[in-house]
Amino acid sequence: MNRTILVTGTGIDAGRLEALKARGYDVRQPSPVLTEEQLTHELQGVVAYLHGGEERASRAALESAKATLKVVAFLGVGYETFVDVAAADDLKIVVTSTPGAARDSVATFTVGQIINANLRIFQQYGNRYPDWTSAEELPSELSVRNVGIVGMGVIGSRIAEMLRVAFDANVAYYSRTPKRHLERSLDMKFMELPDLAEWSDILVVMVPGNDTTTSMIDDEVLGRARPGTILINTARPSVVDPVALYASMKADRVHLAVFDGFYGKDSEAAVRLLQDFGSRMFVTGHVASHTRQAMDRMLDQAVMSIENLLGGNADPYAVGAADRIPEP
């Protein structure tokens, strides 16, 4: 069996890969930014692929490696954006993720962005003295703000907990499945998505990026947003329709938009957003999960998954065809 494992991405602690090397595997780490063509080349002869980068493991790239590739271990939970899982299933390649490992880092980052946008701290950088001209310009405390959360999974529920316990914010949510236990424990309510947008001063997007959530935040939703809404998207850009966002920002229904990760360079609507509303767009490069502790937890889970599956054992973090073990 081939003994090469491909590892991609930045912020990877090489020491946490020693367990793989100790088992006789050759660990290869190429340039952190790979095109599809480069990924296809790097996957040749590889038995496992630890996906920690921004590249897309497309059907074509996976098919090129089908003779040897057994496992794709993705760092994070949003694997559907970066790995063609259907193709992996067809090719009998097992895909794994690292659920829960980045919960606190993403939740903390998101709450930090909420605080920054709500208090407009960014406007005060470089000012030695306050420059407000009227009381109406003063920001409001979170305790009087309505925060709507779209998605009440592991991270969304952690964000809700932080906002309720630490700031006494008014929190409501939308989820495919209502979370009655959280409604009781956190004293928050479930709302349908358009109603949530209309109710919220701050709308937080925290659902995975996949076929069912693409453009979930569309004209119907943003058309109901109240004037001056702050939109926080630390999930996946694709969940928010860029054309609908442009229209809502032009009408000042969405006054500030905060993204962790942004649309592709080929998106004309995304280019227009930055050109026309650059001072109201705050974009970071998909870094919410990149704390040292979260990266260490994700790496440890991914390494364990690779060891399990290449050793002929089932793995609890497998997705897609989760009950399959790679053939030796």
Image (spheres, rainbow, N blue to C red):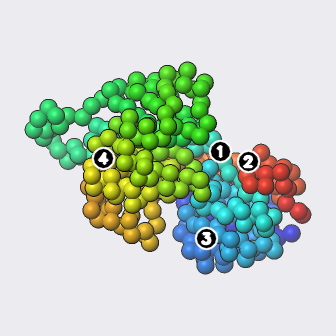
Amino acid marked by disc 2: Tyr
Q: Position of residue 128 (x, y in %)?
A: 15, 42
Q: Relative to 321, does residue 253 appear above or below in the rendering?
A: above
Mark 1 closeness class: few <14, some 14–19, many ≥20 residues within 10 Å: some
Question: Upstream in the sequence, badge 1 or badge 4?
Answer: 1
**What's the CA distance linking mark 3 and mark 2?**
25 Å
Nearer the camera: disc 3 or disc 1: 1
**What's the CA distance linking mark 2 and mark 1?**
8 Å
Tag 1 residue: 99
Look at the numbered discs 3 and 1 and tell me whether their residues touch, using CB distance below 8 Å.
Answer: no
Tag 3 residue: 30
Question: Upstream in the sequence, badge 3 or badge 4?
Answer: 3
**What's the CA distance linking mark 2 and mark 4?**
40 Å
Q: Can the viewer see residue 318?
A: yes
Nearer the camera: disc 2 or disc 4: 4
Q: Relative to 92, does residue 289 appear above or below in the rendering?
A: above
**What's the CA distance linking mark 3 and mark 1?**
25 Å
Tag 4 residue: 253
Pick the front one: 104 or 270 = 270
Tag 2 residue: 317
For mark 3, give the secondary structure.
loop
Residue ID at (28%, 43%): 227
Nearer the camera: disc 1 or disc 4: 4
Nearer the camera: disc 3 or disc 4: 4
Quarter holding the N terminus is bottom right
